[in-house]
Amino acid sequence: MKNRFLRIWICVLSLAMCMQSLYSQNDFPSLELTQLPCDGTSDASTRSLMETAIILSGVDVQSTQAQNVLSRYDSLSKKVCSAQYQKMDSATRAEAVLTLMYDQVLSRYQLPQSSIVTMFENGTYNCVSSSVLYACLATDAGLTVRPLKTTGHAFCQVNINGSWVTVETTNPYGYNPGERKYVSEDPNRYAVVEAKVYRSCTVCSLPMLVSLIAQNRASVAKEQGDVTSSVELMLLRVSLLQNASRAEQNEALDGFLTACNNYAVNDQRKNNYVRALDWLILCKETDSCYWSDTLQSVYDNTLFNQCADYLNAGKWKDASDFLAEYKTYATPSRCREIEVLVFTKYVESTVYAVEPDQAIAFLNEVKTNPLASEKVAADRIKYLLEYSWLHKINAVSKTDGYLAAVSAADQALKALPKNAAITRSRQSCLDNYAVQVHNTFATTANSGKYTEARRILDEGLANYPQSSVLQRDSRTLRSMGY
């Protein structure tokens, strides 16, 4: 028993090593979660959030570039924690934090610019990068902050004396939109940021706000055709939010699954079906959470497309082998559909490769196969039976004559009652027989052999009494006294 257990484990380990080798050869993105400075909980420190934001911006947190950013952030954090800011009332302090950001960091809005590092280095920002900075600094300043996000925007709110006040971080005058902000001592010079009401606006955690950096960068990567980076960035988002609320975890996971789907579809569109399937298998086998109805559909369609390519090239055996190799994770209905198509192609290939009698015998035999009851297969078998019988009728007409071909057609109609094509073929054989008899009769009569001509006509009419051609010939000969 011990040796048997060992043998089983050797087999399992060998399989695992083979699968690992397969995936490594394909050089897929890693599906391992990353340990980040922020653990995703709502009470995460602003320093850990900023470090995580740097990583999500694509920079090693230990690099000189990252340390320069953190140094500048620490300087700003120290400033908002100073007595100068702490003696301000909460409303003044909340606005002062926004002003400080524009004095020290922000200079130019740029829609796709979510990177915290780029923001500190050249002052360009968007709603996400500026909201992350504001949320962290305002929290450092002792304010209660809550981020909000919509489909295409992010901003913050601060709690001022029990009421939530909006901060549009993309504008230096964005504290409490709708309120006049005087830009000089001249009372006629002021700015007003429009107060907007966003549909589907939801409050989110600070880690969720930071995770939007990865989401935005993943979106840009996808638009540029870099599906690998898109997967990696969306997995970073999953890593960050693994300890967040269930709703935020699910949102991050859904985004990641979409990136996984795009990765597979990208290979599928290039006809790299094997690679697409191997990638999807890796997703499913890594974690059951890394699977969805959409990924299942892509898997099924990719498997179908590869098998269809084989079948279109006449390679039904290759299609059958490929299905056997990859059917494990396909839905039973899709497998059945492909099995029917492979079976149908196998039947078709066999029929076209043999003589009619062999084809007819083969088709009658395969009709007992359970797959033959499926409509696609049943219709094709019916067509192939018709084709084989027609082929036989034609062959018999050439070797044994038209009457023998009519007999073959009668056999065919027993197998395929009321078949229009076979009925027409039978009639064609009779008409050709009548023409053949007429020609023989005419040659004989023209030679003056009228008695022999009568015999030929009588025999012909006995075989085909409905022939108008032979009936006319018979009347003509009778008028001559024969």
Image (tube, rainbow, N blue to C red):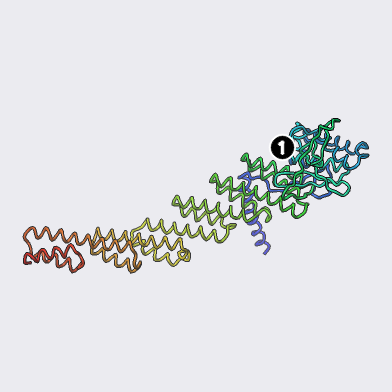
Tell me how many marks there are: 1
Q: Residue at x 36, y 58 (%)?
A: 354
- The answer to whether residue 291 shows anywhere in this view is yes
Query: Where 176 sits versus 364, above or below?
Result: above
Residue 111 in the image, given as x and y percentages of width and height: 70, 38
Left/right of residue 202 with respect to residue 382 in the rendered view:
right
Q: Residue at x 52, y 51 (%)?
A: 305
Q: Quadrant of the N terminus?
A: bottom right
Residue 66 in the image, given as x and y percentages of width and height: 78, 35
Which secondary structure lies at badge 1?
loop
Residue 90 in the image, given as x and y percentages of width and height: 89, 43
Q: Residue at x 11, y 58 (%)?
A: 443
Q: Quadrant of the C terminus?
A: bottom left
**Of residues 315 and 376, the one drawn nearer to the viewer in this rendering:** 376
Q: Quadrant of residue 409?
A: bottom left
- Label 1, residues with CA under 10 Å away: few <14, some 14-19, many ≥20: many
- The answer to whether residue 71 shows anywhere in this view is no
Q: Residue at x 56, y 47 (%)?
A: 268
Left/right of residue 311 with respect to residue 66 in the rendered view:
left
Direction front: furthest residue: 188
**Of residues 469 and 270, the one drawn nearer to the viewer in this rendering:** 469
Amino acid bearing label 1: Gln
Query: Where 386 sits versus 73, above or below?
Result: below
**Of residues 174 and 51, the one drawn nearer to the viewer in this rendering:** 174
Which residue is label 1 attached to? Answer: 113
Left/right of residue 8 with respect to residue 434 in the rendered view:
right
Left/right of residue 451 with respect to residue 273 in the rendered view:
left
**Of residues 114 and 281, the one drawn nearer to the viewer in this rendering:** 114
Query: Where 304 sits versus 475, above or below?
Result: above
Residue 430 in the image, given as x and y percentages of width and height: 23, 63
